[in-house]
Amino acid sequence: MSEPRTSAPRDVPPPRPVASPTTTPPAEESPLARAGRAVADAVAGLSGAAGRSTAGGLRDVVGTLAGAVAGAFAGPSGPDTARTDGPADAPPAGGRGPGALLGDLLSATVPRLPVRDRERLRAAHPGAADDEIAEALVQRAARLTSGVGAAAGGLSAAHWFAPPSLLAVPLELGAETVLVAAVEIMLIAELHELHGRRPPGDAARRAEAYLAAWSEQRAVGEQGLGSLLGAAGMRALRRRMTRRLAGAVPTAAPFLVGAALSGRVNRRATESLARRVLADLRGPRG
């Protein structure tokens, strides 16, 4: 016989089953965000291999990004709806022109670009003066945009010798357009960092400011007025993308000389943009 209880009963809650830990799956990136990340990764890879990228490697990059462009703008019927066999400036399905679509992709790309700050730029060029670093950045970007243009031109020219593959030409031109623009925006951003002219705001605001600066082909204003891309700013961006795409159209000419032509045009355009931005950055503030 057990002894009687002498202590007060304890209020013990009934046992409960232990629920398995729940983890919220990360939000899946949209096709546009994935394509923007692919472009930014390509810029990072090419920048790290500047001067060592082979023509074959650049063609692979442009071809891969063409697939990303197709995936980003695929309609409800699948990626094939993003393809068009019409001229490069024909509106795709959905009623939006290529300038607007590529502008959206560039907007998704810029916040992901691996922009280096002033300290990292100086560490990468030990002993060099700021003007020497700026010149090195300009020449690197010019080599990249020239190589990308030549690679895309070679791909497009090759399609003219295989007519069934002509459907891919607009996608490759779109990939070249966004990739070249991203390289130039990264150049603008690093020139601002080098000269101590970082726009105000967080990383997203700075990305918008650099995007607006590229649209206007000028440095960011002293008060960072370009840091908000309103309706007017987006229209300017789309016009710039449309002109940039039109400039890539000669690469679709049925001659391999189109590749060399595109490379030279890209180099001149990048160097001209850099001169305008540097003139603004080195001029009087305000």
Image (cartoon, rainbow, N blue to C red):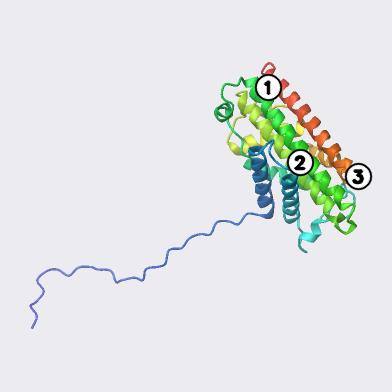
- 50 vs 103, nearest the viewer: 50
Q: Which residue is mark 1?
A: 281
Q: Is residue 20 above or below residue 259?
A: below
Q: Is residue 65 above or below residue 138?
A: below
> Residue at (66%, 20%) from the top-left corner?
131
Mark 1 or mark 2, which is nearer the start of the sequence? 2
Spatial separation of the CA atoms under disc 2 and disc 3: 17 Å
Q: Which residue is mark 3?
A: 255
Q: Secondary structure at mark 1?
A: helix
Displayed quadrant of residue 126: top right
Residue type at tag 1: Leu
Q: Secondary structure at mark 2?
A: helix
Which image quarter holds the N terminus? bottom left
Apparent side of residue 220 relative to residue 174 in the rendered image (left or right): left
Q: Which residue is mark 2?
A: 148
Mark 3 or mark 1, which is nearer the start of the sequence? 3
Residue type at tag 3: Phe
- 181 vs 93, nearest the viewer: 181
Mark 3 or mark 2, which is nearer the start of the sequence? 2
Q: Residue 19, can we see it? A: yes
Apparent side of residue 198 relative to residue 259 in the rendered image (left or right): left
Q: Contact (CB < 8 A) between labels 2 and 1? A: no
Spatial separation of the CA atoms under disc 2 and disc 1: 27 Å
Displayed quadrant of residue 132: top right
Residue type at tag 2: Val
